[in-house]
Amino acid sequence: MRKKNIFITTLIIGALLAAGIIFFHGVPLGKTSEKTEAKQSGGFERLFARFTDGYGWVLDRMIDRRWIVVAVFLLAVAGAFALSGRIGGEFLPLIDDGRIMVKVKMPTGASVSETDRVLRNIEAQIMGDPLIQSNFTLAGGYVKGLTTYEIANEGEVDIQLVSKAVRDISTGEYIARLRKVVGKLQPPGGKAMVKQMPIKGIHGMQASDIVVQVRGQEMETLADLASKTAKTISSLNQFQNVFVSMDLTKPEFQVRVDRVKAAELGVSVSDIATSLRSLITGAVATRYRDGSEYYDIRLVVPEQRLTSRQDIENLSISCARGDVLRLRDIAAVVPGTGPVEIIRENQIKQITVEADITSGDLAGSVRELQSALSELERPAGYLFDFGGNAEMMADMKDTVLAVLAFALFFSFVVLTVQFNSLKLPGLILGCPWR
């Protein structure tokens, strides 16, 4: 069971501060000895009168022992601050709603039928389980928000357990049991992960507890740093389902330009890149209008003429002097692998490393992971950022501090209007024991 939200600690500290201010400045210094005359018309009035009389009796004795109350108040505040560093933090602890997802990611190039075969094997293992109310399988894509994306090598099985009232096992316990079953069905070169689905209706909530964003410019350096990050996370015993978002297994041809030869022939690297982009992906020459709709007319080399490396080497490149060259004259075409997609945030390339927490709390896990990542050597210009639930929890803490600051400001404004003075509100809010 995870620890309670750090937000509770903030509320306790705020409540203690407010209680101290109200007690020491909102209560008259003289003793209260008059009994409240209760109306005998109803039980609620009699109960409220007894409460008022009891409060007056306690207040009379507390005023005579002000410094004892001050000491207790300060000890309570100090204890709250001391516990705030030890109590774990969560943005929103997962609820026992019985929503589970088995995420399957196959190697790049895997067909939909192969992904579906792995998902069917998982379905066969959970079929007939009386704890499962329903399940839904998606092969060849994934769901993000309200959008379903098509990708052949990914799929998932969404499971809904029966109501909590009719099962004697929690969602977390069932996930731990299901991980052992799915662990025996891991696809070759792929990965099958069991996790609890995030809470619905909250923008930014992700299925993974920890999301480390590795940012930089060069993809090779980013991939190497992301791999080291994944190994560091796996070495810590409190994480599981470690996954790197970047897939560098896509086969491709890479064009390596001989800059010296290209310069001698009057061809720049940008000219080569523009020509290849126009020949392979096509260039929009004009547009066709059909009523109110416009359609691009794209000129592109037919796919039948680009079936081998030699076909690419024989592509024609125009130079600034008007001559036509072959690509093989100024560049080498070599086979290689590259990323399936390149993700950017604020125009900076990034690779995300995701993981789930097996024990402990989110805030403590982030602190431990930050300490471990600080020991990794990374080139200048490459950064580690924490996204997902960790980022949302940090934003929540900033919001709470802003709310407390506004509450203090408006309290000062109200007291200033009430006392028609700036000195008294400052004394009341600044020195609660005077």
Image (spheres, rainbow, N blue to C red):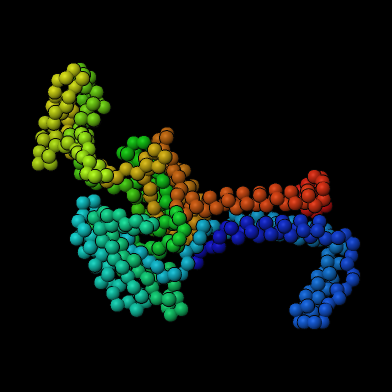
Identify which residue is drawn at 28% across, 63% down: 138
Depth check: give the residue in front, 236 or 80: 80
Whether residue 362 sits left or right of residue 142 in the image: it is right
Quarter residue 383 falls in: top left
Percent x, y of residue 322: 16, 19
Percent x, y of residue 123: 27, 70
> Which residue in the rendered view is the most extreme toward the front?
291
Quarter residue 129 falls in: bottom left
Identify which residue is drawn at 69% across, 55% down: 78
Percent x, y of residue 280: 18, 37
3 w.r.t. 214: above or below: below
Res. 378 in view: no
Identify which residue is drawn at 13% across, 23% down: 324
Res. 156 in view: yes
Percent x, y of residue 283: 21, 35
The number of discs equals: 0
Whether residue 246 sits left or right of residue 89 in the image: it is left
Identify which residue is drawn at 68% across, 52% down: 407
